[in-house]
């Protein structure tokens, strides 16, 4: 079973510095060789990365841009491999593999990705007129799970590969040919 581990309220180092509690494991070295399952959500869960139509995900321009930058992670960070991933209307999942103990930690890699996509999002809004620029692109944090064995890896790969199908089974999608329109900028 996949779970997100939250810090106990006694861990207040991040709370003091940033006014918020970290959701990372307290003593874990995130530059350590290993596999990590990450989820990044759009700001306020805005449905701007694409839409689900007839049980298939169709990327918006913003979703295509997010995919391009995701695929550039191994070029930027040579000891990083991108495994399975999926982009959904309001979030993305990916398995990121650090092939060796790394100078770049997982938080640094995610920060780079979110910075590059946000900058591209703002720039493209000026040049290709994205009609859904509503402020921020991503939520301020992300979720991660350290993949500890082959069984977890297989389970997570299956979860990623069936994510679109699972999304269409949600109560608000049943019986609709089009689900989750990708333009939603309500505050």
Image (spheres, rainbow, N blue to C red):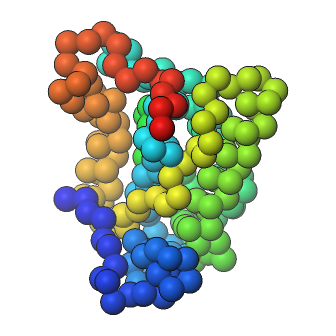
Quadrant in the picture for residue 164? top left
Residue 7: which quarter of the image?
bottom left
Q: Quadrant of the N terminus?
A: bottom left
The answer, for residue 92, to whether it is visible in the render is no
Q: Vertically, is 157 above or below 184?
A: below
Q: Quadrant of residue 6?
A: bottom left
95 sits left or right of 171 in the view? right
Which residue ends up furthest to the right in the rendered image?
127
In this picture, is 147 found above or below 22?
A: above
Q: At 29% from the left edge and 43% from the top edge, which residue is drawn?
A: 159
Expressed as whole percent of the image width and height from the top left, the position of residue 23 reads 40, 71
Residue 115: percent from the left, percent from the top? 68, 54
In the rendered structure, the answer to whether residue 179 lies left or right of residue 49 reads left
In the rendered image, residue 104, in percent from the top left (x then y), is placed at 64, 72
- The image position of residue 156, as x and y in percent, is 31, 50
Q: Nearer the viewer, residue 44 or 114?
A: 44
* Numbered-mark total: 0
Residue at the extreme front of the image, as rendered: 187
The residue drawn where x is 43% and y is 41% is 45
Residue drawn 81% across the image and 27% down it: 127
Instruction: Between residue 95 and residue 59, name the one nearer to us.
Output: 59
The reply to whether residue 144 is visible in this rendering is: yes
Residue drawn at x 66%, y 45% is: 117
Q: Nearer the viewer, residue 95 or 56?
A: 56
């Amino acid at each position: 079973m996949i779970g997100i581990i939250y810090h106990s309220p006694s861990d207040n180092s991040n709370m003091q510095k940033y006014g918020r509690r970290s959701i990372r494991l307290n003593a874990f070295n995130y530059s350590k060789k290993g596999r990590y399952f990450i989820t990044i959500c759009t700001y306020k869960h805005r449905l701007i990365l694409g839409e689900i139509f007839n049980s298939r995900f169709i990327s918006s321009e913003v979703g295509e841009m997010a995919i391009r930058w995701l695929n550039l992670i191994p070029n930027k960070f040579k000891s990083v491999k991108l495994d399975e991933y999926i982009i959904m209307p309001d979030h993305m999942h990916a398995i990121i593999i650090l092939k060796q103990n790394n100078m770049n930690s997982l938080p640094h890699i995610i920060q780079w990705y979110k910075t590059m996509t946000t900058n591209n999002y703002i720039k493209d809004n000026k040049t290709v007129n994205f009609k859904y620029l509503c402020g921020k692109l991503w939520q301020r944090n992300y979720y991660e799970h350290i993949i500890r064995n082959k069984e977890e890896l297989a389970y997570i790969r299956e979860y990623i590969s069936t994510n679109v199908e699972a999304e269409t089974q949600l109560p608000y999608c049943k019986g609709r040919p089009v689900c989750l329109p990708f333009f939603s900028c309500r505050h």
